[in-house]
Image: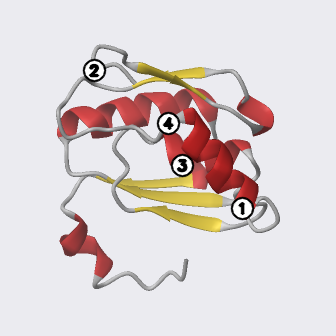
Amino acid sequence: MKHQDRTLRIIGGNWRGRKITFPQHDGIRPTGDRVRETLFNWLMHDIRGADCLDLFAGSGVLSIEALSRGANHVTLIESNAAASSHISQNLSAQCRSEQVRQHQIERHELVGPMRHPF
């Protein structure tokens, strides 16, 4: 993916073909189409109805892809404020709020006290 490219498309599920945006930032390296396709092919029998954790959310594309393919709920953790804001915008355009829990904190601040199994 070229550095100036700031859009990704959802590659499967109910939202297939929809585009999401993400901020241009050196620390954000979205998972490419081929890798996402392979990942979700592996998970296709487990993703429907699953609760998912996206620990380094970045663009949020993995969580949006999971919801598009039938995941019940996603929890996203992203420390970058600009990325977190973009994720919120993308999620509000795609899904119901009860399907998402988003945290803009450092991952080590949340993982210890989490009680929800993933």
In the rendered image, residue 59, in percent from the top left (x then y), is placed at: 39, 37
Disc nearer the start of the sequence (4/3): 4
Q: Distance between the residues labelled 1 and 4?
A: 16 Å
The residue under the point 33% across, 56% down is 56
Name the side, left or right, on which 111 lies relative to 21: left
Tell me the amino acid under the disc marked 4.
Gly
Tell me the amino acid under the disc marked 1.
Trp
Q: Name the residue under label 3.
A: 63
Disc nearer the start of the sequence (3/2): 2
Give the quarter of the figure containing the N terminus. Answer: top left
Disc nearer the start of the sequence (4/2): 2
The residue under the point 28% across, 84% down is 112
Q: Are marks 1 and 4 in contact (CB under 8 Å)?
A: no
Q: How far apart are marks 4 and 3 (CA)?
A: 14 Å
Tell me the amino acid under the disc marked 3.
Ser
Q: How far apart are marks 4 and 2 (CA)?
A: 13 Å
Badge 1 marks a residue whose secondary structure is: helix
Indicate which disc residue 3 carries.
Answer: 2
95 and 23: which one is in front? 23
Indicate which disc residue 27 carries.
Answer: none
Query: Local crowd at mark 3 within 10 Å, few (<14), some, or many (≥20)?
Result: many
The residue under the point 22% across, 32% down is 82
Give the quarter of the figure containing the C terminus. Answer: bottom right
Q: In this view, does 111 lie above or below 35?
A: below
Q: Are marks 4 and 2 in contact (CB under 8 Å)?
A: no
114 and 6: which one is in front? 6
